[in-house]
Amino acid sequence: METKRSKRFWKETLHAYLFLLPSFIVLGIFVFWPIGYSFVLSFFKWDFANQKNPYFNGLENYAKLFRMDMELPYSFWEALAYSAAYIMTALAVVSLVKGFTLSQKHFGDRSFDPFRKRKFVFMSLVAILFILTLAAAAFESIPALMAMVAAGFVLVMIMKKTISTSEGTGMWTSLLVIVGVYIAFKTLSGVRYELFDFLLVTKESSVFIKAIYNTLYYVLLTTPTGIAISLGIALILNMPLKGKIFYRTSFFIPYITSVVAISLVWQWIFNDEYGLLNYMLTLLGGDKVNWLTDEKWTIPTIAIVSVWKMVGYNAIIFLAGLQSIDKFYYEAAEVDGATKFQQFRHITWPLLSPTTFFVLIVSVIANFKVFTQVFVLYNQLPGPYNNSGMTMVYYIFDKFYSEQRMGEASAAAYVLFMIIMVLTFFQFQAGRKRVKYTS
């Protein structure tokens, strides 16, 4: 009997893979093979001069991406040491704040007192850590800073084991505390040796690092803005309005329209002299903005076009998530006297977390691949001047197509792949705690 079942299992498995074989062949030719081949190519010196005889040069292509054109005032490892010490101390402060919040929640509960008895000790240790980190930064002592990183890690682990910090302050409060502590260190120590400042300095010394900076700036500008606007549109479209089908179609049309056509239209809208946007600004009493010729407006201009294109797609996804929430929750909340804002905060937003998580992942990956808007808006140039619109995908295109340096282009592509993979990993890790799936 066991043999018959085993034979049947393997027979069905073979048939299943035979059905999948055509798809595997197509994916292998057009996806898996190019990915593997480009990875191998990233370790070779293959450019126009060595097109017929590329030779292995190891990690030279990757090193060349981050090579500086000028001498920097400090090294990457120094910047990393300062940032690590600042962040670890900030995490210790966050753990302390969470502990205080949790003890306040259980104030008066005599059966719960795991943190209150250790409150003074933890406060003293965190204060000492803060002062020592500040002193190490002021005296520019890298060994002392690394010691503070280790001490902060140990302190956070002790507080985590002593009291559950899964409750307490929310994500945004924790983020504000981390940013506040980080800025306090930079201000009080008088030292600007940290990763963000390092990136600001090096972006003018390396085209690839500037491409990373511009791409990150674009992602941070576009992703939260697009999600917030999309969610607002979805909430409006979910109301009992007349002509909802027309509005949904109107918002969705930009998503299915060619990016090139959209960018060309927006190029006319952004025109400095007779563009529609500047015309409206002058009607409202404002001054004209050099959307396409000013360096500081390059990334915001690209972001406006991208948000306008993607907002309809994200709104439809959010609308589907809103319509999947059972009306029973809202009816029960109304009976209890909850306001609309309270319903959104305690019902809509938590139950919409899987949809938000999906939109966030898709948006971040799509935004890292921005290229066409830059290419069309600035007439096949990476911005008006000073590579102000140079993104990572544009850099890959420029190296491969314009300069014929296929090895360097492949290396840059894999750096982009690693950045997206790391960010996606952290998003999934955060999503495990924040996303609430309902059956």
Image: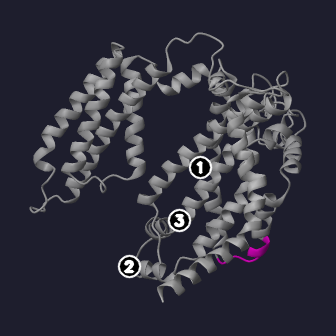
> Quadrant of residue 392 in the image?
top right
Residue 402 location (% of width, % of height): 85, 29
Classify 313 as above or below 388: below
| Residue occupying image coordinates x 42% and y 17% | 191
- For residue 97, what is the image quadrant? top left
Asked whether, in this view, residue 303 is left or right of residue 102, the answer is: right
Label 2 Cα neighbours within 10 Å, binned few <14 / some 14-19 / many ≥20? few
Please report whichever mark, 2 or 1, sits nearer to the chain's N-terminal start.
Answer: 1
Q: Which residue is mark 3?
A: 354
- Badge 3 or badge 1: first in the primary sequence: 1
Residues at discs 3 and 1 in contact (Cβ within 8 Å): no
Where is residue 424 drawn, in percent x and y?
Answer: 55, 50
Q: Earlier in the sequence, mark 3 or mark 2?
A: 2
Residue 233 placed where, x, y %? 66, 63
Which one is nearer the viewer's eye here, 328 or 162?
162
Residue drawn at (78%, 54%) of the image:
29
Describe the element under mark 3 as helix, strand or loop.
helix
Q: Which residue is mark 2?
A: 336
For marks 3 and 1, give the one nearer the viewer. 3
Q: Nearer the viewer, residue 405 or 262?
A: 405
Query: Extreme bottom residue here?
Result: 1
State how far apart marks 3 and 2 are (Cα). 26 Å
Mark 1 residue crowding within 10 angstroms, few (<14) / some (14–19) / many (20+): some
Magenta region: 240-246
Q: Amino acid at mark 3?
A: Pro
* Residue 41: numbered disc: none
Disc number placed over residue 224 in the picture, else none: 1
Q: Could you tell me if residue 138 is visible in this image? A: yes
Amino acid type, label 1 = Pro
- Tell me the amino acid under the disc marked 2: Asp
